[in-house]
Image: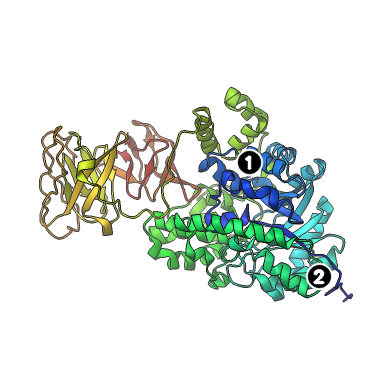
Amino acid sequence: MEVKNIMSKTRKVGFTETVLRDANQSLIATRLPYSKFEPILETMDKAGYYSAEVWGGATFDVCLRYLQEDPWERLRKIRAKMPNTKLQMLLRGQNILGYKHYPDDVVRKFVEHSVKNGIDIIRIFDALNDARNLEVAIDETVKQGAHASGTICFTTSPVHTLEKNVQMVKDLQKMGVKSICIKDMAGIMGPKESYDLVSAIKDAVPELPVVIHTHCTTGLAFMTCLKGVEAGADVIDTAISPMSGGTAQPATETLAYALRSFGYEVDLDDKVLIEMADFFKGVRADFIKDGTLDPISMATDTQCLNYQIPGGMLSNLISQLKMMNAIDKLDQALAETPKVRADLGYPPLVTPTSQMVGSQAVQNVLAGERYKVVGKEIKAYCRGEYGRTPAPIDPDIQKKILGNTPVVEGRFADSLAPEFEKTKKELGATAKSDEDVLSYIAFPQVAMAFFKDREAGFPKKEEPKKDAAAPAAPKASDLPPMPAWQGHVYYANVPASVSNGVTARPIQPFAASYQPPHLVLAPKDTCPGTYTITIDGKPYQISVAAADGPAPAAAAPVAAAPAPAVPVAAPAAPAPAPAPAPVPAAAPAPAAPAAGETPVPSPMPGNVFKVECKPGQAVKAGDVLVILEAMKMEIEVTAPVDGTVKSVAAAVGTAVNTDDLLVTLG
Ligand code: CO
């Protein structure tokens, strides 16, 4: 073995600051708006970073989806405020910033416009480490005169060996990368693996700088960075201290201190770092206050050494389970994750495979049967649309998921027709720029909603709070009485009635036959109680009381009198089956499920993305009826039996809960 430049007292170590991208993504689900960090950018520009990671990853999606920000404009603004720092982004190779493969022309356009809008360094990875999926993005980055950083997604499995990683690095060098990044998205790379892997890479491609990217999740990160640097790594990813640790990167100041004490040269200005830390303490406090920064994300969790859950995936899993009122299933979902990963041929867990494996694990746990509900992306993955899996997919599971659908041979993107010009034409005046077209191609529904909002001057809208408690009982005097409105309130497990012509019925077991409109209220542990419901944008108060005995007739619709909602007395212990609720005379009768009718309920909470059937249409078992968007995945809801579509309750763009009726088959 040749002697390496270990512990050289003069060697320089560069720092990439991740606070605006990865730390933001890992700790606060990327919810940091531009306006909140703008005041610190000019200061940050003086810190002396090797680069600042400011864009890509989830920032793009979240800007459009939640922050009413044009991600391209964000990039241009950062560029203007930080002229002296290299701006870096994370790109998912052939997936650009989305979750599926895009044709080559789209990848090239995306890279071109990223560089034009201010990016200097593009870190390019493929979730499966299939180098064929990096080639086009790297080639275009080089053509645009930017720095392509070729990335290895670090993972451990029986099939991930040092030799395999070295081979990949050599392939990347041939493609023209200017540096190699070891991306340890789950924080599972220990100091020993870091030392060995960096040494092997430095032996194989001594002229390429090596960057270490890791997360503090398991508590290994500081040691991993230090040993990596000792083995020859040139750059480390860190986050300014208030936004460091937990699922994010190790602290910038801490590593600067430690490395200097060993004699490494660190070009950071400590005064600037102190200013930045003061600033981000305030930012952190705000996000703790509003519940966005979950203390779980800040903790050290060594479970990740078994589960290999990356930071972003862990916080996503927690927030998704909370939204489904199933946070008690977190342990089960965490235990299911490595099993799903093994079934699928040991993909490294990084976007999009982390979301795919994570949501599949959640679905396996919630559905009570493995691979009963399978997202469209997982189907595509099993078909080979994401590239070569590190190990073969379990053939039985592949068969269960795919049926007789054929598997893709070769590079999937080769089979995709160019999309950019065609989409540009289709969008016409809706797209104000090529960047708009790219936003739309990456996230069609989200981008379209964004364009409309932009057109309307961004009307105020509220993002649902992550941790919404049961609605506080409003003061009766503050709210108008409910109008004579007929419908049913569905909620879990406790039969009850509510006032004003609304009949409450349990969700479980699923009652097939109600007529919309209906409401879905309250998890079982928060009812009965007093609720505010909103109809046509107006809040009304209703009271829900637990039942003992057969549910009573609902109170007659209340007219204009500003009466507080009437708590409806209610009989008995929760009935195991939904007692057919008596219906006030005026209400449309919720017919009992007619013989031969098959309700198709939503398997999970989500948004209706597409409705793929029409009343009267004949369908076969397995045909797609509705596509939901849930947990960032598209979930196909299929016909359980052959039949005819009798009615479609699902409406595109609306939110649905588990067991909400989507379609009725006759
Ligand atoms: Co990361």
The residue under label 2 is 264
Element under disc 2: loop
| Residue at (42% x, 58% y) in the render | 321
In this rendering, the answer to whether 431 lies above or below 502 is above
Q: Is residue 185 left or right of residue 451?
A: right
Position of the C terminus by quadrant: top left
Mark 1 vs mark 2, CA separation in Å: 34 Å
Please name the amino acid that badge 2 sits on: Tyr
Q: How many marks?
A: 2
Q: Nearer the viewer, residue 520 or 120?
A: 120
Q: Nearer the viewer, residue 627 or 480?
A: 480
Occupied quadrant, residue 229: bottom right
Occupied quadrant, residue 27: bottom right
Label 1 packing within 10 angstroms: few (<14), some (14-19), many (20+): many
Q: Position of residue 522 (x, y in %)?
A: 29, 52
Label 2 packing within 10 angstroms: few (<14), some (14-19), many (20+): many
Element under disc 1: helix
Please name the amino acid that badge 1 sits on: Arg
| Residue at (39% x, 59% y) in the render | 366
- Toward the right, the furthest residue is 2
In this rendering, the answer to whether 440 lies above or below 274 is above
Q: Position of residue 434 (x, y in %)?
A: 67, 31
| Residue at (87% x, 76% y) in the render | 1
The residue under label 1 is 74
Can residue 590 be seen at all in this image of the molecule?
yes
Mark 1 vs 2, N-terminal side: 1
Can residue 92 be seen at all in this image of the molecule?
no
Q: Position of residue 613 (x, y in %)?
A: 40, 34
